[in-house]
Image (cartoon, rainbow, N blue to C red):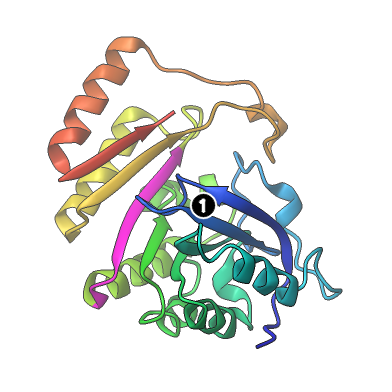
Amino acid sequence: MTAALQISGLTPLTTIDYPDHLACVVYTQGCPLRCAYCQNSHLIPFREEPGQLSWSRVVSFMEQRKEMLEAVVFSGGEPTLQSGLREAMLSAIELGYKVGLHTAGVSASSLSKLLGLTDWIGLDVKAPDDLYQTVTGRANQHIQNQRCLDLLLDSGTNFECRTTVDWRLMQPEDLLRLAEQLMQRGVRRYALQINHGGQCLDPNLCEPAVISTSEKVQLKAVLNTMFPRFEWRE
């Protein structure tokens, strides 16, 4: 099966991108968001020319690794905007793999077409509604994100919500507002990922920002009480 995917890279083995599974990660090209802390800015532009990898090469890789790997994770970029993603997922399932998806929840209609094929989804929830545009550089994206979360909550699919935080864009109290919202909606698994600088889309964020140890300890303690499973990912 040949899928029309713009593929920009492949991680052959990971233990962290699909919970409790050995997986590979397929990175797709193109993202509509402009998150200031993004460290994969090379994946942002949408391109019409063939990607760095063909799907047929990825399939060959998966055929060779069936005895080692358990899952294939589609990441990006924003993979749900790839017209060939459903077809690619079906071919991975035919090979006996579980399917994982990383998405920023930019299109509820696109996500709805993939549910039922995915075994696990990581949904990025960028910020509270009032800060969503500040973080992502795009207006009204929080509406689509909320619709995607509604779909996941209704679907029975295993998923986690996660938020990447740069303390110059969002304060601990903002994060707690977001966590409270997610908890009340029924999210049971939540992860916090800290931006430590590096090659950020916004050069002003390339140096790390930290909060005090006492703030960190207090924030972590509160978040631990809010979700059955919470992870603080440094």
Question: How many numbered discs, if any?
Answer: 1
- Whether residue 195 is visible, yes or no, is yes
Residue at 39% x, 63% y: name it: 121
Question: Which quadrant of the figure contains the C terminus?
Answer: top left
The image shows residue 153 at horizontal and vertical percentages of 24, 69
- Whether residue 140 is visible, yes or no, is no
Quick one: label 1, few (<14), some, or many (20+) residues within 10 Å? some
Judging depth in this view, the residue of 102 and 151 nearest the camera is 102
Can you tell which quarter of the image residue 79 is in?
Answer: bottom right
Residue at 22% x, 56% y: name it: 187
Judging depth in this view, the residue of 119 and 22 nearest the camera is 22
Left or right, 158 with respect to 192, comes to left
Residue at 34% x, 32% y: name it: 232
The image shows residue 23 at horizontal and vertical percentages of 50, 56
Judging depth in this view, the residue of 48 and 181 nearest the camera is 48
Left or right, 93 with respect to 192, comes to right
Residue behind mark 1:
133
Range shown magenta: 155-164
Does the magenta run of residues contain 163? yes
In the image, residue 96 above or below residue 192: below
Q: Secondary structure at mark 1?
A: helix
Residue at 22% x, 76% y: name it: 154
Judging depth in this view, the residue of 94 and 134 nearest the camera is 94
Identity, as a three-letter code, of the amino acid under mark 1: Gln
Does the magenta run of residues contain 30? no
The single residue placed furthest to the front in the displayed view is: 67
The image shows residue 82 at horizontal and vertical percentages of 63, 76
